[in-house]
Image (cartoon, helix red, strand yellow):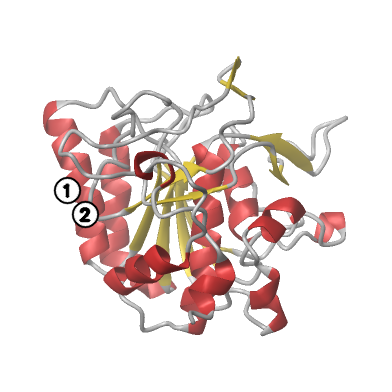
Amino acid sequence: MNRVRELVGASRAYEQGIYGAGIGVAVLDSGVNERHPDLRGRLVYSYNYLTASPESVDDCGHGTHICGIIGGTGVASGGRYQGLAPRCHFLSLKVLDKDGNGNSGTLVQALYWLIDHGKEYDVRIVNISAGSTEIRGRKRTGLLKAVEDTWDAGFIVCAAAGNQGPARSSITVPGTSPRIITVGSSDDGRAVRLMGVRKANYSGRGPTSACVCKPDVTAPGAYIRSCSADFEKPGRGFYTDKSGTSMATPVVSGSLALLLSRERQLTGKEVKLRLRTACRDLGLPRNQQGWGQIWVPGLLFPE
């Protein structure tokens, strides 16, 4: 995470005392191990949609890693692996199982709960580091409607572009929605291990089936070191490396938490307009890089 913070210029925010305080980020993922030192005291609400209980558990490790990227304090590493917005707070809505799998119905259920209750917890950002190219018919329509209803209700929805690249039109649902912010990996030229297979150029590419250019923005996603849910097990450390657009998405969510903690009145449309002018052009095709790689100084201090 020290490398990622440098790549996106986050230190400019910290120099101005901006750390994401007061901004709630809802993480729809595999849960979170709230006992991790970097996340302790940061979780204000949790619900496990797989067991219909309020337990906070992460039997996959994906969600804990995501939370660490967004806003882990880095206390277990002396600050080295601090997340982007270390003073934001989290809501964990567990919709993925121990293998990282889920279904669209559970995700839709969680999104509509957020529409009804998210503002009670000062949620501004919704992170969805999940998606599929296999969702069809009513399930696809229902999920896209749910993320767009969430956006229209005033929440900034950030979703992964998926790891099905480099083919055209390989963005996963719900990242295909034109309304939300879809995030690809800016460094997917580096080969990484995904689902047991070593792969490069994996980040989902546009356009969507509706001819919409996607992704909207990119961020580093290769070999991101963040919080391990298994740190309490013998021989395991506090941190682990993971890769993919799942890891790039929380870099954007954390960066936007910094922005919104400074300018709380910004709407989703205004956030998108700010992103459009603030990103760094990587010289890649529009349907690969979107507007470019996220750049925190441009977000917070536009010229």
Residue under label 2, please give it. Answer: 148
Compared with 11, 245 (above or below) is above
Coordinates of residue 37 in the picture (x, y in percent): 77, 56
Question: Is 23 left or right of 232, judged from the image as shown?
Answer: left
Residue drawn at the location 61% of the way across and 34% of the way down: 243
Residue under label 1, please give it. Answer: 145
Disc 1 is placed on an element classified as helix
> Mark 1 and mark 2 in contact (Cβ < 8 Å)?
yes
Compared with 274, 241 (above or below) is above
- Label 2: few (<14), some or many (≥20) within 10 Å? some
Residue drawn at the location 29% of the way across and 56% of the way down: 113
Label 2 to label 1: alpha-carbon separation: 5 Å
Question: Is 250 left or right of 34, judged from the image as shown?
Answer: left
Disc 2 is placed on an element classified as helix
Coordinates of residue 115 in the picture (x, y in percent): 26, 62
Identify the amino acid type marked 1.
Answer: Lys
**Residue 157 visible in the shown view:** yes
Question: Is 19 left or right of 30, judged from the image as shown?
Answer: right
- Judged from this view, the residue extending furthest toward the left is 138
Question: Which quadrant of the view contains residue 200?
Answer: top right
Residue drawn at the location 41% of the way across and 39% of the way down: 288
- Label 1: few (<14), some or many (≥20) within 10 Å? some
Coordinates of residue 222 in the picture (x, y in percent): 63, 37
Identify the amino acid type marked 2.
Answer: Glu
In this rendered view, identify the residue nearer to me: 100 or 219.
219
